[in-house]
Amino acid sequence: AYRITGNEQYAQACAAILQEWSSLKDLSKEEDSQLAFCYHFPPMVVAASLIEQSKFWDPTKKAAFVYFLENHARQMTTQYYHNNWGN
């Protein structure tokens, strides 16, 4: 909505959600948690790119999100699974 309207309120709400994701440290791999993460999380990466020009997506928040991607989200991948979870 931010990219379509330019309304910073949408970017602010999105940045708040992404900031909460960035604060997570321990992601569960129990049951189908990994699969659900791999299915539902990619839109968060797209969302981050869509608010990149917003004043609410400042370098500190962006850096925290990138750190989360590199150090936590990446470990949730199922791409190397040799079953129907592999992507």
Image: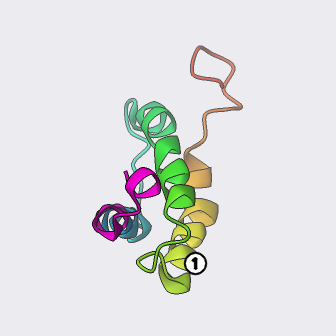
Asked if residue 36 lies in the magenta stretch, the reply is no
Colouring used for the render: rainbow
Q: Is residue 40 above or below residue 18?
A: above
Name the image quarter holding residue 37.
Answer: top left
Q: In which quadrant is the C terminus drawn?
A: top right
For mark 1, does the 10 Å Cα neighbourhood hold few (<14), some (14 to 19), or many (20 or more) residues?
few
Residue 15 vs residue 2, the one in the foreground: 2
Q: Give percent across and percent down for residue 61.
A: 47, 78
Q: Is residue 2 above or below residue 61?
A: above
Kindly identify the amino acid type of the residue bearing the numbered disc 1.
Ala
Residue 25 vs residue 67, the one in the foreground: 67
Q: Residue furthest bottom?
A: 60
Q: Give percent across and percent down for residue 34.
A: 47, 38
Secondary structure beneath label 1: helix
Is residue 8 left or right of 73 when viewed as pictured? left
Q: Residue furthest top?
A: 84
Residue occupying the point 60% across, 65% down: 71
Residue indicated by mark 1: 63
The number of callouts visible is: 1
State which region is magenta: 1-14
Residue 42 vs residue 46, the one in the foreground: 46
Is residue 63 left or right of 31 when viewed as pictured? right
Residue occupying the point 31% across, 61% down: 10
Residue occupying the point 47% across, 73% down: 54
Name the image quarter holding residue 56.
Answer: bottom left
